Amino acid sequence: MNRLSRFRLIACLPALLLWGCAAKYVEPTGDKVALLAIENGTTEPVTTAIYGDAGECRNRSVIPSIAPGEQGAFKVATGRDLALTVTMSRREIKYGTTLVFRPEAGHRYLANLNMDAKAGEVLLSDITSLLAPKPVKATAREWIRASGDAGPWCKPAGE
């Protein structure tokens, strides 16, 4: 194993340990869904967790890692808050954010992920109308380490 491969393995190890035991995300069925695409504009794979209970980020499930320059898309439930945590890294800098928003049925959303030498950024847009994409109002939540996959993985709103 060459030096670069070892470095990448070591850089990805915390994410692997953090996400490795969580359940795989299962997309909802029916017509009360929205589509969420995650576009990885970073130079490393990104991991994303979705929580069944957005209130305290409980019942975590994970989406397969998205490679640099790639996009992953999946269906999400609507009519209630959706909490997701995105984790990305660039060399020795790691960035994670937990966002909560309320998807609407039939809408398409894009989370565009970017990272520079200092920090990461997640831009969330409603792209249902490709001619007029709109920024989505999302609330950032403070991530906390849980003792198990059931959570809580973030502090409740208002704390």
Image: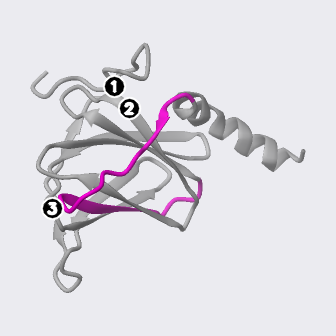
Look at the picture and state if 124 lies above or below 53.
Answer: below
Quarter assignment of residue 130 = bottom left
Indicate left or right for 74 with 15 as reference. Answer: left
- Image point (28%, 35%), residue name: 52
Element class at badge 1: loop
Look at the picture and state if 22 lies above or below 144.
Answer: below
* Residue 35 forms part of the magenta stretch: yes
- Image point (48%, 34%), residue name: 23
Disc 1 designates what residue? 153
Amino acid marked by disc 1: Trp
Q: CA distance from mark 3 to mark 1?
A: 26 Å
Q: Nearer the viewer, residue 159 or 92?
A: 159
Quadrant in the picture for the N terminus: top right
Q: Residue furthest bottom?
A: 131
Disc 3 designates what residue? 105
Quadrant in the picture for the C terminus: top left
* Residue 145 forms part of the magenta stretch: no
Q: Residue furthest right?
A: 1
Q: Nearer the viewer, residue 132 or 118?
A: 132
Amino acid marked by disc 3: Ala
Disc 2 designates what residue? 60
Magenta stretch bounds: 21-44
Quarter assignment of residue 140 = top left
